[in-house]
């Protein structure tokens, strides 16, 4: 099967029961995509067991290097937090500082930096 031979789009370094879902805004201005993170690590008494330092890796085109920004948003916080992108050969990596119940990472092209055809 061809699909099983393809590398995964998103690599998540986390404990079990942490899930990530990618969504791309097809005609957005600026170009953007979001990764929804969900923590299903439940405590016996209720609530989630928070997790620190969750890493995400995504493949990229060389055209993207230095042209993307990443911000992390959590419920109950008014401001997003800038995430540093670590650029490696063929992929970039970012680390989310803390995941409670859920959070969102927004990846956006710096204005005028990327063509729509090259974005995920």
Image (cartoon, rainbow, N blue to C red):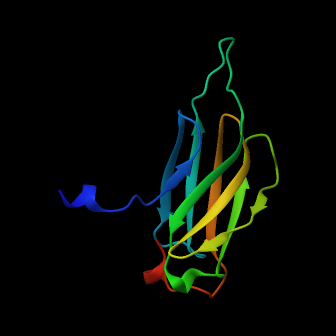
- The percent coordinates of residue 34 (x first, y second) are 57, 58
- The percent coordinates of residue 42 (x first, y second) are 62, 22
- Which residue does the image show at 82% across and 54% down from the upper left? 79
Q: Quadrant of residue 83?
A: bottom right
* Residue at the far left in the pictured view: 1
Side (left or right) of 57 relative to 67: left
Nearest the eye: 60 or 79: 60
- The percent coordinates of residue 69 (x first, y second) are 68, 71
* Residue at the far right in the pictured view: 78
- Which residue does the image show at 49% across and 49% down from the upper left? 21
Nearest the eye: 119 or 26: 119
Side (left or right) of 17 relative to 100: left
Q: Quadrant of the N terminus?
A: bottom left
* Residue at the far top in the pictured view: 45
Q: Quadrant of residue 84?
A: bottom right
- Which residue does the image show at 52% across and 64% down from the upper left? 58
Against 114, residue 77 (above or below) is above
Side (left or right) of 99 relative to 29: right
Against 84, residue 102 (above or below) is above
Nearest the eye: 78 or 42: 42
- The percent coordinates of residue 23 (x first, y second) are 49, 57
How many marks do you count on the picture?
0
- Which residue does the image show at 48% across and 63% down from the upper left? 24
């Amino acid at each position: 099967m061809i699909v099983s031979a393809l590398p995964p789009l998103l690599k998540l370094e986390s404990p079990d029961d942490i899930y990530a879902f990618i969504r791309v805004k097809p005609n957005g201005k600026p170009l953007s995509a979001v990764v929804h993170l969900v923590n299903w690590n439940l405590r016996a008494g209720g609530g989630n067991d928070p997790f620190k330092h969750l890493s995400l890796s995504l493949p990229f085109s060389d055209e993207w290097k230095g042209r993307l920004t990443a911000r992390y948003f959590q419920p109950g916080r008014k401001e997003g937090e800038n995430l540093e992108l670590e650029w490696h050969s063929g992929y970039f990596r970012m680390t989310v500082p803390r995941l409670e119940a859920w959070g969102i990472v927004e990846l956006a092209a710096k204005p005028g930096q990327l063509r729509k055809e090259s974005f995920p």
